Image: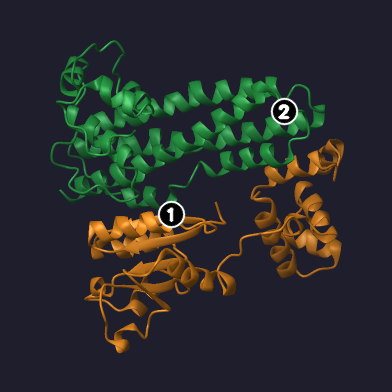
Amino acid sequence: MYKKEKYRETDKMSDLICDNYPMVLVMNRFGIALGFEERNIGEVCRQNGVDTCTFLTVVNFLIEAKAAPVENVGKCFSMEALITYLHNAHDYFLKFRLPGLRSKLTEAIEDCPADVAFVITKFFDEYVDEVNKHMMYEEKTVFPYVRGLLKGKDGSKYNISIFRKRHDQIEMKIIELKNLLLKYYPGKGNNLLNSVLFDIFATEQDLSTHNLVEDYLFIPAILELEKR
Amino acid sequence: MSEHLKVIIAETSPVIRCGLEVQLKRLSGLRLQLIEVADAEFLYESMRMHKPDMLIINPSMQGCFSLQHLKEETGCPHVKCIALLYALADPALLRLYDEQISIYDSADEIKRKLEHFDTDELPELPDTDEQQMLSVREKEIVVCVVKGMTNREIATRLFLSTHTVITHRRNIARKLQIHSASGLTVYAIVNKLIELSDIDKQQKT
């Protein structure tokens, strides 16, 4: 069963991961390696040079899974650590998750008519382009702006509400791909295709929680920064 | 997904808020996307961001603003407002609400109250296969969209008004749960509404 209360730095890292296996991704994105023996969250974080409070804020936010802004994020929170986390998440999607999904998908639909395989692959590629655009905007515009703010520059030309307005839901199109395959896929089902579907479900979930972190943790934290 | 009803629960008590959320999630047959708001301060922002179909709100939270103002300010003129009541309340206060839920209501009573909206104005849940099938006209429009034609071009080609084309497209998106042109392309190819070569030809010209 999922443990419901908030995790603290004295809890064991292995308990956290076993109770909530998606947190292995979070750990990874903060740059924490496996092999943490019996150490607790605080010890593992310090050992890996990760800000414990930021790690716990993200973990507890995701476990609570509430679509509401996190209050008082500013106090012990490291913006630099959160940016590293978001950046690594982008890398994970663009360099690992989506390319892997693509090659698996093309292999799984090999048997269906060539024109169908062609349009499905094209759809997927367009989707990846969209995700890429979305994430590159954050990498090239939002992150540098926030880093500037941290150094005390005022970004008079830009502010985070611009980002907030244009921050769209990138998981919509992968939901569409899922629907297309479920409802209209003409070939025979196979194990590989099932596995692709499982990956799509997982990616959809992962992208949507990624967006939640941006909307309810990252943006409120930047709003705090801008006020200073 | 678009068929979900977006519902904001605005209530300061975490116990009541979570309790209502659990209760609503258990209701079968209604697909709800629930958003919690604990604080009047976040209500405007949350409304603006999520554009909910329904707002379930504790009237005492309203305090310093009017419902009318809330709807106008946040660009949600059609949101259904439901008062969440702990006890008897002044009928004059409740006049502005579309419905009321008491914290003592049973699950069935709540469901009935929510469904009551569902039938008249909120987006319908398709309940039969037939509703999912595209009409001949809708298929024609899918083919045009896939060929890359604009709404106006489609209207001219099929002797329709642009407005009608838009309505058809909205219905197609709702029936198929496909919103993008590239998604419709996959649908059209799979269902043999069009050949791949037709699309290429069109886009080159």
Residue pointed to by mark 2: A189
Residue drawn at 57 percent across, 57 percent down: B3
Residue drawn at 22 percent across, 45 percent down: A154
Give how far across and how far down residue A131 sits, in percent: 51, 36
Chain seen in green: A
Towards the viewer: B123 or A158: B123
Q: Residues within 10 Å of mark 1 (few under 14, many from 20)?
A: some
Asked if residue B45 lies left or right of residue A54, the reply is right
Residue A146 position by quadrant? top left
Residue A212 position by quadrant? top left
When the figure is inspected, residue A106 is found, relative to residue B28, above or below; the finding is above
Asked whether the residues under the numbered discs 1 and 2 touch, taking CB atoms below 8 Å apart as contact, a structural biologist would say no
Residue drawn at 66 percent across, 59 percent down: B126
As helix, strand or loop, the secondary structure at mark 2 comes to loop
Chain seen in orange: B
Give how far across and how far down residue A128 sits, in percent: 57, 32
Q: Nearer the viewer, mark 1 or mark 2?
A: 1
Towards the viewer: A73 or A6: A6
Which chain letter goes with mark 2? A
Q: Which amino acid does the dot numbered 2 rest on?
A: Gly
Give how far across and how far down residue A126 sits, in percent: 62, 35
Outermost residue, bottom direction? B92
When the figure is inspected, residue B85 is found, relative to residue B181, above or below; the finding is below
As helix, strand or loop, the secondary structure at mark 1 comes to helix
Give how far across and how far down residue A197 sits, in percent: 60, 31
Q: Residues within 10 Å of mark 2 (few under 14, many from 20)?
A: some
Asked if residue B147 lies left or right of residue B107, the reply is right
Respond whether the residues carrying marks 1 and 2 are from the same subunit: no
Residue pointed to by mark 1: B25
